[in-house]
Amino acid sequence: MKLLSARSLVFATLLVSLAGCKPGDPVQPVDSTLETAVPPILLPARDSVYGAMYSIKVVHVFNGHVTKSEQASAVFYDNPSNTTTATEHANAGFVAVNAFTLNQGHDNEYDRTAIEGHIFEDLDFADSVYWVVQGDETVEPFTFAWSNRFPAFKGEFPAVITRKDGLSFTFDEASTPLADSVFVAIAAGDKLLVKRYPGDIGKVFIGADELEKLQACSFSQPGYLQISACVDDIFTPDGKPRLMVKQTTEIRTVIIR
């Protein structure tokens, strides 16, 4: 996928593939860079679809400095495919969300990012999204309106993670409203820990045995904690199912002891 926003928020192909793990599956830390890198945005995966259309809100808090952005991203396939592994993308012509035209890459990936405080501050993702796809030879034209509100994580973000004590969160109707699933990613030094949970699982605990694999991080050289609340749906305008995703991701710097 393409760049998401400032401070190197990216859809990294390697880590997006982790999104296919079933809730509760262990995910081993993987190498990223020698210094702590902002963890890539993790997305819900679906098999046997003819494309995927993502609407994502991002809040990035770097040692108290807040950056907000919104991104729309879309891919289309000629044949039923898995959204994490498909590499052949179909041309869908003109694609827009909320009247904002997406940029079409040479590999027929579509994306557009708006960053608060810049020329384009948002993509009007206050609540609803409205997609328009012009279509091409293998992609029929269609529109899609999704009025449901975006999911979000309303719980507390820890400023400090003490590895030996473990880490707990609660994901339920109050803390993650409207979420089908939740991703938790902790980046520290050259390691990344990723967990995925159902949005209504209740209390979850990440034990010391997993956290101890992460490196210690300070205020001047922090780690990152990312929590993504996701809701997805299947839209079938022409007999070809497509994955539709709304997601809110918050990434914060964190001290790890």
Image (cartoon, rainbow, N blue to C red):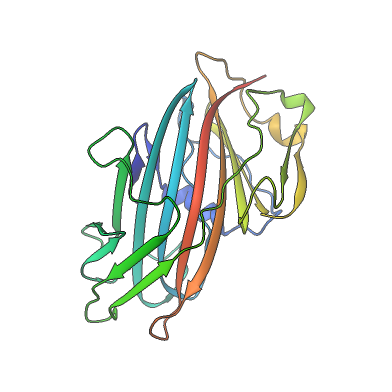
User: Residue 187, located in which quarter of the rendered image?
Assistant: top right
In the image, residue 61 lies at what x, y percent?
A: 48, 28
Q: Is residue 36 left or right of residue 9?
A: right
In the image, residue 19 lies at what x, y percent?
A: 55, 55
In the image, residue 131 lies at what x, y percent?
A: 34, 66
In the image, residue 13 lies at what x, y percent?
A: 42, 51
Answer above or below: position of 155 versus 113. above
Along the line of sight, which residue is nearer the eye, 152 or 113? Answer: 152
Residue depicted at 53% across the width and 30% down the height: 252
Answer above or below: position of 62 versus 130. above
User: Residue 9, located in which quarter of the rendered image?
Assistant: top left
Residue at the far top: name it: 220
How many discs mark residues in the rendered view?
Answer: 0
Q: Is residue 177 left or right of residue 72?
A: right
Along the line of sight, which residue is nearer the eye, 152 or 2? Answer: 152
Residue at the far bottom: name it: 239
Answer above or below: position of 23 versus 220. below
* Viewer can see residue 142: yes
Q: Is residue 94 left or right of residue 64?
A: left
Answer above or below: position of 43 versus 249. below
Quadrant position of the C terminus in the picture? top right
Along the line of sight, which residue is nearer the eye, 16 or 178? Answer: 178
